[in-house]
Image (tube, rainbow, N blue to C red):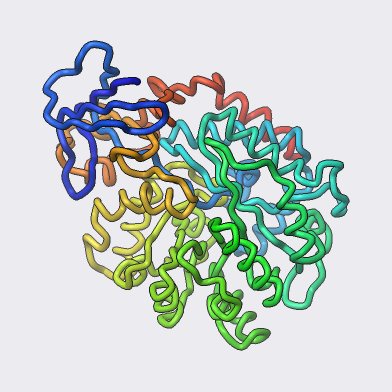
Amino acid sequence: MSLWWAEHAWLGGAHTTADVLFEVKEDRFDAITPGVTSPPAGAVRLEGLTLPGLANVHSHAFQRALRGRTHEGPGSFWTWRDLMYAVADRLDPDNYLRLAAAVFAEMALAGFTAVGEFHYVHHGPRGVPYDDPNAMGTALVEAARLAGIRLTLIDACYLDGGFGVPLEGPQLRFGDSSAPGWIERVEQLPPPDSHFRLAAAVHSVRAVPPMAILEVAEWAAERRCPLHAHVSEQRLEQTETRKHRGTTPLGVLAAAGALVPDFTAVHGTHLSKKDIEGLAESASGCCICPTTERDLGDGIGPAAALHQAGVQLSIGSDSQAVIDGLAEIRALEMDSRLASEQRGVLGSHTLLETATANGMGALGWEAGALAIGKLADFVNVRLDRAGTAGCDPSLASSAVFAASGSDVEMVVVGGRPVVREGRHLGVLDVAGELSAAIAAVIE
């Protein structure tokens, strides 16, 4: 058993709780006692504010190599995608392991204790499978283990290059020829363990035909694993889907039986009112990625309308233009204020739930709350840095509106420290590893 004493801890609501003692047995919270005015002998002292571990629900780790290289000049998601494909085509299991481990370590430094890696670079050049057909996926599993964070490998079915368009060029690496082919490969992945979970994904309705969506959704339902899909990120996607399928992307997914409580729509930037109602009625969730959507010029997602309808929100770093969970939830609120011309759209407690409990649920982990029985994954944020000095530690808003990933002091996963004093304990030189790994996949 280990003891952790938090000067202030967020246990839910708009306010924090002072002087909280956490007892961790094995990898879960065994007892939580507020009002312990000083740390007992042997307890680790956590100054500042302690939060549940943050969940990064939507990530493409390899896209971290594009940061700083693709942001200037005119263009759109579709022109950016060509640059992204060029990096994807240079990946192999070895360089992807090194790159992903460094990226996941950067996530840990920012307070993420779990990541959902939306994985679709499955095969070798020209689509030729590796001897181990899941070599790229198992590289990601090992990368997360090295970085010390939990991984939900969201393995994506990707069959077409567009509506009625075959895969070509780098896209050939993404495809499994059919939904049964995807299922055959996925069922060869390692079994889940304390740091690894499997989820299914339909890449998008333009990349997976309706009957294949049905097969993937049925497979996920039988195994009770989460199901994710890119949905309505771009206006062109809306237009093309209506042209070829006669409805919205979410309408296609609904008709195929994909809208279930374990379903997460990623982005949802251009959801219709009916789409939002469909997510709410099916108890599905929506993962919004504000910093990526800003960078790509996607638009502002309907976070307020989704929340008002009862749809659980979560956040993701997606393209890795920014890796900072607190920045993502702050962007969710600030973008909503711009869209509505109102302040206080979501509220601090809702935003923290978005980054913690909601996200962990979308990834299939019993974490995201400082509560007895939950996995002991938590993050300590300093409130005495230049950007946070003077903030009221009794208010959850101090973390949401003042702190950032750079204020993370300690990260604990399953009761074991992964980051201490702002330094990663497993990947000792995160910046150096990132530089070397990115150089290996950038011409």
Total numbered circles = 0
Q: Residue furthest front?
A: 222
Which residue is found at the position 40% from the left and 21% from the top?
420
Q: Position of residue 357 (x, y in %)?
A: 36, 49
Q: Position of residue 222 (x, y in %)?
A: 60, 62
**Quadrant placement of the C terminus:** top right
Which of the pair 71/109 is nearer the observer?
Answer: 109
Quarter location, residue 331:
bottom left
| Position of residue 273 in the picture relative to residue 434 (left or right) | left
Which of the pair 94/153 is nearer the observer?
Answer: 153
**Quadrant placement of the N terminus:** top left
| Position of residue 125 in the picture relative to residue 423 (left or right) | right
Q: Position of residue 242 (x, y in %)?
A: 60, 85
Quarter location, residue 334:
bottom left
Which residue is found at the position 69% from the left and 53% from the top?
120
Q: Position of residue 368 (x, y in %)?
A: 37, 44
| Position of residue 132 in the picture relative to residue 365 (left or right) | right
Q: Is residue 423 above or below residue 223?
A: above
Q: Residue furthest top?
A: 41
Which residue is found at the position 67% from the left and 72% from the top?
206
| Position of residue 292 in the picture relative to residue 1 (left or right) | right
Which residue is found at the position 41% from the left and 36% from the top?
111
